[in-house]
Image (spheres, rainbow, N blue to C red):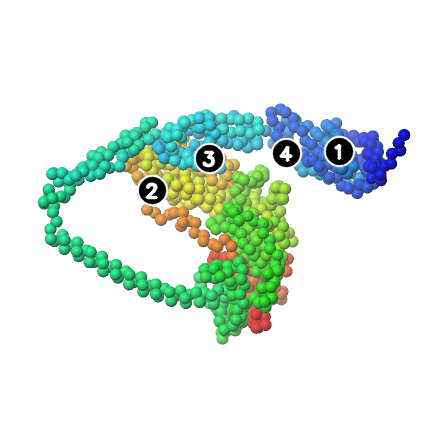
Amino acid sequence: MMSLHLGPFVRWRFRVMLAYSWILSIGFTCIGAEHAAAPVTHAVPAAFSDLLPHFLVEPDDVYIVKNKPVTLTCRSTPATQIYFKCNGEWVHQDDHVIEHTIDPATGLPIMQVMIDITRQQVEKIFGLEDYWCQCVAWSTTGTQKSQKAYVRIAYLRKNFEEEPLGKEVALDQEVLLRCHPPEGVPVAEVEWQRNDEVLDPKTDPNFFITSDHNLIIKQARLADTGNYTCVAKNIVARRKSSSAIVIVYVDGGWSEWSKWSVCGADCAMWRSRECTQPTPGTGGKDCQGIDLQSLNCTSEQCPQTASGAEDVALYVGMVAVALCLTLLLIVVVLVYRRRKGGLDADVADSSILTTGFQPMGVKPAKPENSHLLTIHPDLTTTTTSYQGTLRSRHDATMATMGKFSMGNGPLLEPLPNGSHTLHNGKLPADPDDFMSRLSTQTYFKTLPRDAANTSYGTFNFLGGRLTLPNTGISLLIPPEAIPRGKIYEIYLTVQKKEDLRLPLAGGQTLLGPVVSCGPPGVMLTRPVILSMDHCSDAVPENWAVRLKKQTYEGAWEDVLVLGEELASEPYYCQLETDTCRLFTEHLGRLALVGESLSMVAAKRLKLVLFAPAYCTTLEYSIRVYCMDDTQDVFTEVMQMEKQLGGRLIDEPRVLLFKDSYHNLRLSIHDLPQAQWRSKLLAGYQEIPFYHIWSGSQRSLHCTFTLERLSLSTCDLTGQLCVWQVEGEGQSFSLDFNIAKDNRTLDYESLLMDNSTPALAGPSAFQIPYLIRQKICSSLDAPCPNGADWRLLAQRLKLDRHMSFFATKPSPTSVILDLWESQHFHSGNLNQLAAVMAEIGKQEAMIFLVSDGEC
């Protein structure tokens, strides 16, 4: 017999398998009467005795379809025991199916456990929270828990909450077909069919499907006539609504007029047209108006109309006047261009000298201490320049050159009356050393350049600001927040809520936009400030407000509860009347969620009315949007209506929508019966409470279709009312001309935010860098009489955040950061100077900067 020589590794694996076989022979202890697992420690090979269990497979969320049980699986290595726990109770050992294997690569024992969950088990906890299970694995070192898997009973109701209704529409008219699918778990997906063929807006842009599943035909074509069906489907079933017949009719149009005939002996000429473009069809009306037209003419056969000598003189005089006006206009233009050329040169020189010395865009007020923060450049000293991406906020010349300059000079000089004037200084660094350090800085770049609804910029230790115009969303990056020697490309974007699965339970509601800022994981040495709108009533006792952040795995977790936060936590929030300002050193995807604590808690809704810009048919539609009162949603609706060709017909209104479980009702009244009638069969329309309260449906709206009894009717008057059942409401007075709207209310006047998306360096801040440094060094040190940062916070009405400020190395700098965030557009340095004077710390107000410091 041939002798077999086993290597050390093979012999070791053989001993492992023998040890594991011994483990299997021992078995497991039974579960006690209380279904509690009694963990028993079995031997594991010594080489792996210090390993915790590691999950190879974790249970996933599943749906029970009809009465078919579902199986949850869990696999771990190395593990001596694995048991499932469902809704906090241990599953009996007999209900587990256990398999043991060995990992061929590592020799470690693998244990797999499976359990079945039936519909009856899930239904037992009806009315409580969702049914969930997780597995717990033991080893000789300790235990590990898997993720929770939620088991839900899938269903799809038979009846649609709202089905599409048939319509007869004129050619090129907009058509709205409504559909609210049946209630279901998981939520049903919706598609639209025409004559049993699926409609795809990607291949036919004339169709538009809204976020709440309504179908819009932008301009009805003859080919759009047909049977339209709304189809809802999920893993359980597929439901089809009743078909809505859409008939597109064609009213006859007159062709172009023919050319005028030759002037006849009766001093008249003729032209004609025909009703052929288009020919009336599918019930459309015949052309209205005359098809033959005559006009008097002048010719040699009509001597009574011949021109006389006085007509010739008149024409010559008119030509002479026109020539004189033309020559005068040319002279004016030449003089203007010459004067403008000299003025431009002066302005260019002035802007180059003064950019960086004083904050831009601040309208000077005239308080008693207005001179305290006035910045005058010292043009007699030298300057240093930084070539890069730092841009000035208002100076187009400097934006082109990509430079900023800061001059030498005293920061605060005593004035005869005891006050002080602030002057700007340049960066505290040697020019050559400053440039060499910038050239060696590391660069962080992760954001694709074509991202939508996104602002991005490149920043270093000088900080800066990112803004999403017309959204109320901005990110302030204070000086020194980015470590010296590093350059980050930071982005800010607003997410579409319908693309995210943000879990909301009970009475929770989304109070603002879902915002991403990043890249995640970058190191920040000071908190940045993220500002965004919210739509709560800002009454703290009515709400439990939470900040949620999405993890790398995609789950959402609470990272802050307003009012319960600790000053040492990495997140801190200030909730103002309509704005949330979040301090954080961790970038990522964030959302503000509120849970009402009583039925008086209310969200602010913005009500906006739109109607077609042009109407050539008897039908006329008014769309009433009911959206969260945040700028990002309003801007999105405005842009969508602009694409649809809608026009704003009244100023937006605000309505407080309470957590009273009552729906929102809308109705139209007082239409002139002789001219208009409503095609709505019911007396009002309703939007369900939960559709509004969740905050996840951004553009909820109702459409009122009216019909004028004559094409000559263009004036529309009436009253539109919006109210919550048993609550307060708002009313709109309808009084306008549908053919021609002469009011100045338009998109541009409501979307006037011209903020630069990215500002880097000194141009992003109201307070000059060196002035800020001097204020901080003066007020950070505690003062016995309180004339320090605490008094500054009190004067700026920020004293409720004293404990948060006190935890920071420089409390004054955080206070000034918050002031910058609040006053970016309306910042008044004169007001801040007055506050500094009120503090009364005169010895600290005399800030003198020597040439060496500059």
**Callout 3 secondary element:** loop
Q: Residue furthest front?
A: 2
- In this orientation, does residue 542 appear? no
Mark nearer the N terminus (3 vs 1): 1
Left or right: residue 688 versus residue 249 is right
Task: Please state which amino acid type lies under the numbered disc 1.
Answer: Met
> Counting other residues with Cα less than 10 Å from the Cα at mark 3, is it few (<14), some (14-19), or many (20 or more)?
few
Taking the image as shown, residue 370 lies to the left or right of residue 622, namely: right
Picture quadrant of residue 598 = top right
Location of residue 490 with respect to 27 vertically, above or below = below
Q: CA distance from mark 2 to mark 1?
A: 75 Å
Q: Name which residue type carries label 3.
A: Thr
Residue that badge 2 annotates? 735
Q: Position of residue 440 (x, y in %)?
A: 61, 60
Q: Residue at x 62, y 34 (%)?
A: 129
x, y (%) of residue 639?
Answer: 44, 44
> Residue tagged by mark 1?
111
Towards the viewer: 65 or 125: 65
Of the numbered discs 2 and 1, the one sitting upstream in the chain is 1
Q: Secondary structure at mark 2?
A: strand
The residue under the point 28% across, 37% down is 712
x, y (%) of residue 730?
A: 42, 42
Residue at mark 3: 203
**Residue ID for mark 4:** 61
Question: Is tag 3's residue or tag 4's residue first in the polypeptide sequence?
Answer: 4
Structural crowding at the residue carrying mark 2, measured as other residues with C-alpha within 10 Å and reported as few (<14), some (14–19) or many (≥20): few
Between residue 206 and residue 852, name the one nearer to us: 206
In which quadrant is the C terminus drawn?
Answer: bottom right
9 left or right of 792 in image: right
Q: Which mark sits nearer the N-terminus, 4 or 2?
A: 4
